[in-house]
Image (tube, grey):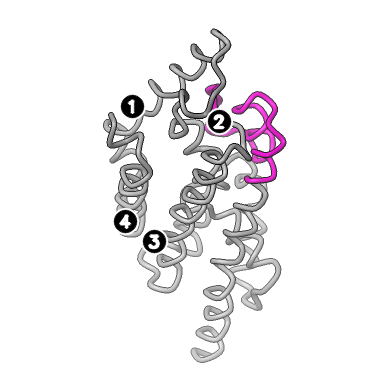
């Protein structure tokens, strides 16, 4: 449990999940038996502590299920909300743009199978790199922002399908800092995916 409450343990778990996704296996389902009991216990403990009036960051579990969903799964595994936006901004590929349009509504509710299997991201050497890197980067950033007290700690459980902004607001009990942190995480995800989307343009042009 202490391993999971540390940032390295969380990042290792996310890395394992992402690697399974990259070969077409549902990563979250693979790690669920390890992840869910620990991270759900952590969020329930936070809810109890807040109910007792304990709100100090040092006494709460920064890493919990809501933290995972709020900052490391934006638009679905791999924070692919950033990929959708990057495609609209930078992609000249008709196939990418068509799938991105299909993905807009699901992405709002953290569902991204149209991207993982439609683009695809799975077994795609160009897109698996940002797919792995992005949630590790957003998770690390959000952990730092929470640790220093800028973002409120996630203290309430919520459905994983809760849309961004709303998820940051509800899970932290109304922390504006958490909303700002989540918006920065989305911007980070766009920035990480952007060069790979541009490379995909060039790959398509080279093929044609």
Mark 4 or mark 3, which has the lower sequence index? 4
- Please say if 91 is above or below 46: below
Q: Is 165 a magenta residue?
A: yes
- Please say if 53 is above or below 154: above
CA gap between label 4 and label 2 equals 28 Å
CA gap between label 1 and label 2 equals 17 Å
Residue 122: mark: 3
CA gap between label 1 and label 3 equals 28 Å
Nearer the camera: disc 2 or disc 3: 2
Nearer the camera: disc 4 or disc 1: 1
Q: Where are the magenta residues, as a range?
A: 153-181
Of the 4 image quadrants, the one containing the C terminus is bottom right
Of the 4 image quadrants, the one containing the N terminus is top left
CA gap between label 4 and label 3 equals 10 Å
Q: Is 13 a magenta residue?
A: no
CA gap between label 2 and label 3 equals 33 Å
| Residue at left offset 31%, top offset 56% | 19
> Dot 1 corresponds to which residue?
38
> Dot 2 corresponds to which residue?
153
User: Which of these two is toward me, 152 or 37?
Assistant: 152
Q: Is residue 86 left or right of residue 28?
A: right
């Amino acid at each position: 449990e202490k391993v999971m409450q540390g940032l390295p343990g969380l990042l290792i778990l996310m890395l394992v999940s992402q690697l399974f996704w990259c070969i077409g296996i549902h990563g979250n389902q693979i790690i669920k038996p390890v992840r869910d009991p620990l991270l759900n216990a952590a969020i329930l403990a936070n809810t109890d502590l807040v109910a007792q009036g304990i709100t100090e960051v040092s006494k709460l579990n920064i890493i919990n299920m809501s933290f995972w969903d709020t900052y490391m799964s934006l638009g679905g595994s791999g924070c692919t909300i950033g990929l959708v936006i990057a495609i609209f901004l930078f992609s000249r590929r008709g196939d990418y743009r068509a799938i991105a349009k299909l993905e807009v509504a699901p992405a709002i509710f953290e569902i991204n199978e149209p991207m993982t299997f439609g683009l695809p991201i799975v077994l795609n050497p160009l897109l698996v790199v940002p797919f792995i890197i992005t949630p590790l980067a957003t998770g690390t950033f959000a952990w730092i922002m929470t640790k220093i007290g800028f973002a409120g700690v996630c203290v309430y459980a919520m459905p994983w399908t809760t849309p961004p902004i709303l998820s940051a607001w509800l899970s932290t009990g109304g922390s504006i800092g958490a909303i700002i942190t989540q918006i920065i995480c989305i911007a980070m995800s766009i920035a990480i995916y952007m060069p790979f989307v541009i490379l995909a343009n060039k790959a398509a042009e080279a093929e044609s």
